[in-house]
Amino acid sequence: GRRPTEINARDVELPKEPYNPRPYLMEFRKYPGIASGLGAEYFYRDDQRSPLTYYHLRSPKSGDTVLVGATDPRAREARTIDNYVKERTRGFAVQIILEGRGVKAYWEPKAPFLKARLGVGAKVKDLTQYCVRDPDVQVHVSKKGDLVVVHGPNKARVGTLAFRLLKKMQPILQPYTSKGAHVAFHPVKKKAMRKK
């Protein structure tokens, strides 16, 4: 089919919006009241390029909300605030997907005794020690055995356990056979078999 012929290959910098000498617009982002726990040390710290303004509203109509304002959208929608709220409300989760014939994870006989098989004739791996290691991080396995979900309070603890489980459930030949585990939306790159 037809392809567009106009490209920005020669432009080192993409065209910018024309400079507007008017004062910057102060805009706000709404967060649940829990975000107030970050306190003045975060919202009024000295090393900010675009200083934040912060309002904590408690009213019967709007409930408990925090408004964070700044001229830069990246400052008012910072990951620090988002992570802080998520840590105290819903937590974090990682999905590990198992693919391939005979590849599955299951409880034997029940949680927390996790076993994983990485193929039809493969040895069963005992992953119980990882499930017991952190009491606040929970491991869930789907009925079919092709999905392992690691859920816990913060990114560091969930990520550590998920990575250890992932490494144990990835065979050496996975890039060639595509049998084994990978994190959801991050499949392992396939390699072509070498021809003799």
Image: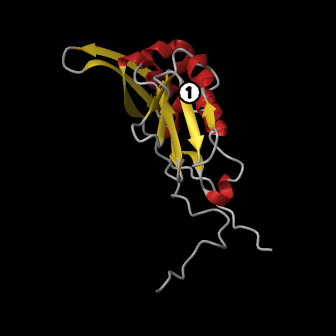
Vertical order, 33 against 145 (above or below)? above
Image quadrant where residue 57 sits: top left
Q: Which residue occupies the extreme bottom position in the image? A: 1
Query: Residue 48, how many percent across, how many down?
Result: 60, 28
Query: Residue 76, how many percent across, how many down?
Result: 47, 32
Would you say residue 51 is visible in this rendering?
Answer: no
Residue at image coords 57%, 46%: 182
Identify the amino acid type marked 1.
Val
The quadrant of the image that shows the C terminus is: bottom right
Looking at this view, is 123 or 82 the one in front? 123
Q: In the rendered view, does 160 fall on the left or right side of 40?
A: right
Query: Residue 127, how many percent across, how many down?
Result: 60, 28
Residue at image coords 76%, 69%: 194
Vertical order, 10 against 68 (above or below)? below
Q: Which residue occupies the extreme left position in the image? A: 61
Query: Residue 42, how many percent across, how many down?
Result: 55, 19
Would you say residue 12 is visible in this rendering?
Answer: yes
Image quadrant where residue 167 sits: top right
Q: Which residue occupies the extreme right position in the image? A: 196
Kindly identify which residue carries mark 1: 158
Secondary structure of the residue carrying numbered label 1: helix
| Mark 1 closeness class: few <14, some 14–19, many ≥20 residues within 10 Å | many
Residue at image coords 38%, 19%: 55
Residue at image coords 59%, 23%: 128
Image colouring: secondary structure
Vertical order, 35 against 124 (above or below)? above
